[in-house]
Image: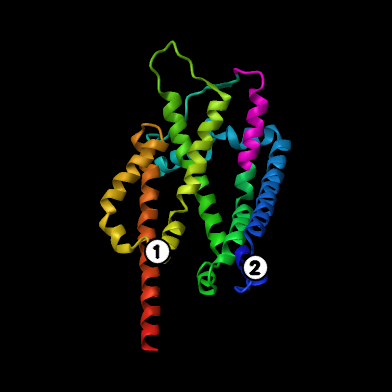
Amino acid sequence: MPLDQVDVDEMDLDDDKEMSFFEHLEELRWHIIRSFAAIAIGAVLIFISGSLFFDNVVFWPKEDDFLTYRAACWLSNEMGLGNAACFSPPKFKLITLKLEEMFVTHLKVSLIAGFIMAFPYVFWEFWRFVSPGLKTEERKYTRGVVFICSILFFIGVSFGYFIISPFAITFLVGYNISNEVLPNIQLSSFVSSITIFSIPAGVLFQLPIVVFFLSKIGLVSSTGMKQYRRHAFIAILLLAALITPPDVVTQFFIGLPLYALYEISITISKRVEKKAAKKEKALSKT
């Protein structure tokens, strides 16, 4: 059973009970404290894993045996192209330029990974604070939202890690303006790049959920989204260009799923409108 459904079923959602402003603040404070505690637990687990997490997760996209490189090469050979589509980044070393850089990077990565691990619980805490303000019927339509948002977030982060990161790293490290320049990449720069390629993708993949709620309150319609489909396509290309390196292949890989999510969002908005129209028709008959 989804966490948010358990919450809705078990919490006291008496519409007659009103809370004061300071009671709301106190409740919000405890939601935030519990969320940070969950992130901290995940961060501690990652921190104590030490090099195990760094070598097998953070630094994996720079190695030739990374899953995406092997999959691309396998697909190339299966299609009869030989090694034409095989790719991997040039060999490079990660260096530190500051005394505290490794320790600070270790903390940073631990917190980021802790947040990713704790995302379902953090979102559940957020939903526990928001859901009492919804009507009974609205809560019925939003059952499972924690589970769906968490799945979309993990899919987005995985997409950024396995698709965007390898193409971006290969392009950026392989870009050379002179043979005098050697690709020795600063540790903090590499970690920041992996983060930028992964976390925003997890957020962008929440588009169908956002459209669902905007459609419920009437701010977005399927007709409007269809009308501005071309504009949305251009906006998606611009967004893909902003969060990826100037590489057409990488922009295509991030732009294509975003546009697919846009089309899915149109379908979701249309379903919401149909249900609303059906309900309105039923009420008019009574």
Work out whether residue 116 or residue 29 is closer to the camera in this orientation and state it: 29
- Residue 242 located left or right of residue 19: left
Instruction: Look at the numbered disc 1 and give the secondary structure of its residue.
Output: helix
- Residue beneath disc 1: 215
Of marks 2 and 1, the one in the foreground: 1
Quick one: label 2, few (<14), some, or many (20+) residues within 10 Å?
A: few
As displayed, is residue 11 above or below residue 159? below
Q: Classify residue 58 by image quadrant.
A: top right
**Residue 139 in magenta?**
no
Q: Classify residue 123 by image quadrant.
A: bottom right
Q: Main secondary structure of the magenta part?
A: helix
As displayed, is residue 177 above or below residue 264? above
Residue range in magenta is: 97-113
**Picture coordinates of residue 141 (x, y %)?**
50, 70
Q: Is residue 80 visible?
A: no
**Residue 101 in magenta?**
yes
Residue at 40% x, 63% y: name it. Answer: 215
Q: Residue furthest top?
A: 180
Q: Locate the N terminus and report the quarter of the image it occupies.
A: bottom right
Mark 1 residue type: Ser
* Disc with the residue nearer the chain's start (2 vs 1): 2
- Residue beneath disc 2: 6
Work out whether residue 245 or residue 35 is closer to the camera in this orientation and state it: 35
Count of number-bearing discs: 2
Q: Residue furthest bottom?
A: 286
Residue at 36% x, 73% y: name it. Answer: 274
Q: Is residue 243 visible?
A: yes
C-alpha span from label 2 to label 1: 25 Å
Q: Classify residue 132 by image quadrant.
A: bottom right
Quick one: label 1, few (<14), some, or many (20+) residues within 10 Å?
A: many
Work out whether residue 192 or residue 185 is closer to the camera in this orientation and state it: 192
